[in-house]
Image (cartoon, rainbow, N blue to C red):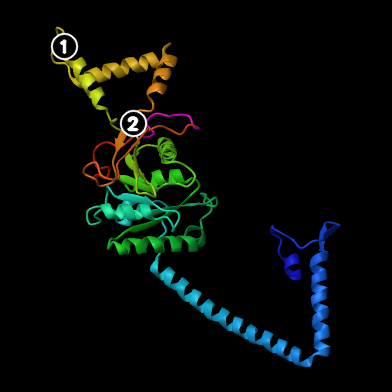
Amino acid sequence: MLVLRFQYKGERGWKVPPNVTIAGHEIPLGLASVFIVLLSTAIVNLFTKSIATVAGVSFAAGFFVIFTVSERVNRKKHALAEQHMREHFQLLPNDTVERAQLGIRPGNVMVTVRDYNTLGHLKWALERIDTKEQDIVVMSARVSQFGTAAYDLSTEQIFSDYEQQLFTRAVSVAENFGKHVSLLVVPARDPWSAIVQTANNLEASAVVSGLSSKMSAQEQAFYLGQAWEAMPEPKRQFIFQVVHPDRRVDTFHIGPHTPSLKTEDVHLVHRLWLNITREPGLESLHHHDILTEALTRFAREYAGHDRQDILRELRKSSGTTVQTRALGERGGGDGSTSQAAEPPATTKPTPNKKDGGPSTPPVVGP
């Protein structure tokens, strides 16, 4: 312990008192006193009690041999396990993520993983997807500050022991379902950008994630939507689904999409259409013409003096709920939830970030 006090430079939760600092060096008086007492006792015992000395030395030597043999055996086991892991996962490094190079079909589902103890969302996706018709890509975004254009990442920085254990668990889960998954690790500075760029390059139709322990599903979708908006063209829209531990599912659209209209909104548009088509010269008017005119007027008024009035009315109606549906369901199943599709309260709202899912299965073909 006295030697470790000088060798170990990290933070300690507790130290044996007292400790005196002289010229910037800490002198552990308490720990040194304990050492002197024990050393004195051992020396006295060595010269006064021969039987106890022999027994003590034999005891220490026996345990030293046992620990040494055990350490060598465990070292061999870990070496074999590491060799097996490296043979099991053959790394195929690429500068960019390309769907054709990975042999993945368009319209695939990308499942993001981070913690090997929380893979419930992967099980949820495997239960609902037929991998013969639709590929599943298990993707881990490795946050790293080392990767730049001038420096290459080493193998240990890209695929560490933790990624090996994470993907081992993921493969084990897939094997339990008798299904195949593709594995992908992407080093990145920002995990949200890595997710949307990878989904775009793979032409994924959906991204499935587990619920974060630090933010809500709405916040996850909001930050993912921000990353999507910041990505340069061309970019594809996709479905983002967050699976809760109780298997509830929140569904969001990332990118511009057809909004989900309430029944009363559809009836209102239809009533307007019936009234307007009675006017001379407007017999051939379509429903979408009414929506186009209404949105054009709304944009003009929002940019004018009525901006604050519009924002006040929108805040009143922002709690309107929409129906969302879990992956692969054909009707209102257990995975359906009702939620308000809005950005987190601590961030500035931005348009077209997310919305509740429509009444159609989110995973579609290319």
Which secondary structure dominates the residues rendered in magenta?
loop
Q: Where, quadrant-wise, is the N terminus in this rendering?
A: bottom right
Residue 126: x %, y % from top left: 30, 55
- Count all numbered tags in the image, as a single digit: 2
Label 1: few (<14), some (14–19) or many (≥20) C-alpha neighbours in 10 Å: few
What amino acid does circle 1 point to? Leu
Camera sees residue 93: yes
Sequence-first disc among 2 and 1: 1
Q: Residue at x 41, y 12 (%)?
A: 306
> Which quadrant would the C terminus be assigned to in this image?
top left
Other-residue count near label 2 (Cα within 10 Å), few / some / many at <14 / 14–19 / ≥20: some
Residue sticking out furthest to the right: 22
337 over 120 or under it: above or below: above
- The residue at 47%/47% (across/down) is 213
- The quarter holding residue 290 reads top left
Question: Where is mark 2, residue-wise?
Answer: 321
Toward the bottom, the furthest residue is 51
**Nearer the viewer's eye, disc 2 or disc 1?**
2
According to the picture, the residue beneath numbered tag 1 turns out to be 282
